[in-house]
Image (cartoon, grey):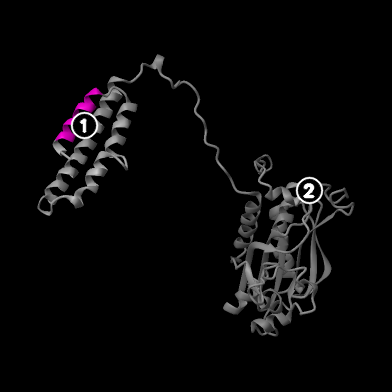
Amino acid sequence: MDINLISAQIKEELDKIVSCDQLEALRLKYLGRKGVIAELTGSIPAVNPQERGAFGKAVNALKQQLFVSLEEKQRSLGVSKAPAPESAETDLGMPGIAQELGHKHPITGIIDQVCGIFSQMGFKVLEGPEIETEHNNFTGLNIPLEHPSRDAFDTFYLKDYEKLLLRSHTSPMQVRAMAKSKPPLAIVVPGRVYRPDAVDASHLFMFHQIEGLMVDQGVKFSDLKGVLEVFVKAVFGKDVAMRFRPHFFPFTEPSVEVDISCIICKGKGCSVCGRKGWLEILGAGLVHPNVFQQAGYDAKKFSGFAFGMGVERIAMLKYGINDIRLFFENDLRFLKQF
């Protein structure tokens, strides 16, 4: 192919161009993936070795000159062919199309808020794996083999991996943290958890929890109450009351369920709180000595407390939502309210 002839042809075609569309067509003809320049470059290996270097330089020079010529022609078209304002297709007086900005999902917002509250009290935020061992999910937390939660009907076990499962709570990170660190220890652990529950207005097979743990010398039940009171009032308001009810958890002793006064009826009794005036928000208690023993902690020297809450439940109470499924249906009409 005669490079000089191609260069003259390009100049002739450029002189005839009067629109940007014609200029783009010329660019594709010569610089496209299957254009003339690509053919010239692909033919270099077939050129006589003694002429190959000169031919390659000539092709590169042609390519560079074409870039320059296209830019010059584009500028000339922009100046000479610009439509007058009154004939322009784009009305510059029309308002622009605003780009819609996203924001945090309400679940993410609650997680950030809760973790922020505990971070200000000195707790460290940790995250753990969603695939766990039986030891971390059950044994290390003093949950015996006969406990119903260890049954295949209540836990997602992984068939191809022996003794591995999808964690049913974020508590396994307590075991991991205590195995890695010595007291004093204060952590909160947010994350997804999995249980084979039937899906309804208050249950899902996947949801979020935030687990908390504090271990040191002389940690008392009153410390747990003080920390949780700060949390409750920061999330639900200073006027909200809190109470503890005796309960049972394998990993804490004594154990309690924590309630707050109904934020709808202010404790007077309504349909939301079942006419009781109280709403359950989390479980807590002092760490069981057997959990310390599994972690290698001296239960006579150290004490601690733990608590766990469902993030969706906190969000439902805070925002007055009556169906947990709304969080995950991706309905923008719902999500835009937060």
Name the spot of residue 58 as percent of width and height, x first: 15, 43
Amino acid type indicated by mark 1: Ile
Name the spot of residue 329 as percent of width and height, x first: 69, 47
Name the spot of residue 147 as percent of width and height, x first: 79, 76
Q: Quadrant of the N terminus?
A: top left
- The dominant secondary structure in magenta is helix
Q: Is residue 129 left or right of residue 87?
A: right
Q: Residue at x 62, y 66 (%)?
A: 130
Q: Residue at x 30, y 29 (%)?
A: 23
Q: CA distance from mark 2 to mark 1?
A: 70 Å
Observer-nearest of 41 and 66? 41
Q: Quadrant of the C terminus?
A: top right
Q: Residue at x 69, y 42 (%)?
A: 334
From what the image shows, is residue 210 above or below residue 136? above
- Mark 2 lies on residue: 322
From what the image shows, is residue 6 above or below residue 228? above
Q: Which residues are magenta?
A: 5-16
Q: Which mark is residue 160?
A: none
Observer-nearest of 260 and 4? 4
In front of the other: label 2 or label 1? Answer: 1
Tell me, yes or no, if residue 136 can be seen here. yes
Classify 10 Å Cα crowding around label 1: few (below 14), some (14-19), many (20 and above).
some
Figure quadrant of residue 248: bottom right
Q: Earlier in the sequence, mark 2 or mark 1?
A: 1
